[in-house]
Image (spheres, helix red, strand yellow):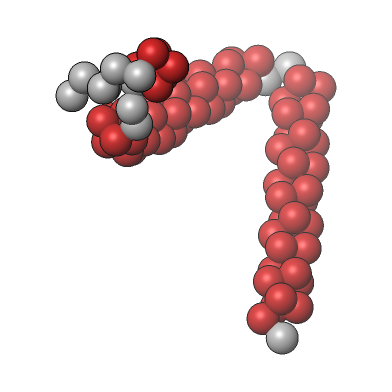
């Protein structure tokens, strides 16, 4: 039962994503057609800024986990030589 619910939710989410893509594509086409390049330039700048903020926050969230994993993992060169890993 739960797999069916997850499947329907994924399909609905995928359809919503395709709808967003279509709406954005039509709006960009209309902005170009009506020669609203100044508005298109502002929206593109804001879009890139939002994307950079998302990437920056995602990277900061993963850096703590990466540092912990690096401490736990032994040095690969020490595994081959039989020498204990440095801490």
Q: Is residue 72 above or below residue 86?
A: below
83 with respect to 16 (left or right) = left
Q: Is 37 placed above or below 61 here?
A: above
Left or right of residue 56: residue 25 = right
Q: Residue at x 34, y 31 (%)?
A: 73
Residue 56 place in picture, x, y as percent: 37, 27
Question: Quadrant where the C terminus lies?
Answer: top left
Front residue of 23 and 38: 23
Residue 23 placed where, x, y %? Answer: 75, 43
Residue name at image x 74 percent, y 41 percent: 21
Judge whether 74 appears above or below 65 on screen: above
The percent position of residue 32, horizontal first and vertical second, equals 76, 20
Looking at the picture, does residue 18 appear above or below residue 11? above
Image quarter of residue 66: top left
Q: Is residue 51 visible?
A: yes
Residue at left 35%, top 19%? 82
**Outermost residue toward the front in this view:** 82
Residue drawn at (29%, 35%) of the image: 72
Q: Give the percent coordinates (x, y) of residue 15.
A: 78, 57
Q: Nearer the viewer, residue 43 or 12?
A: 12
Placement of the N terminus among the 4 image quadrants: bottom right
**Residue 60 appearing in the image:** no
């Amino acid at each position: 039962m739960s797999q069916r619910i997850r499947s329907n939710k994924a399909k609905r989410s995928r359809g919503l994503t395709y709808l967003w893509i279509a709406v954005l594509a039509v709006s960009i086409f209309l902005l170009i057609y009506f020669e609203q390049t100044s508005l298109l330039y502002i929206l593109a700048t804001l879009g890139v800024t939002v994307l950079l903020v998302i990437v920056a926050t995602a990277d900061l969230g993963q850096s703590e986990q990466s540092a912990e994993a690096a401490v736990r993992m032994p040095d690969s060169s020490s595994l081959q030589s039989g020498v204990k890993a440095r801490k």
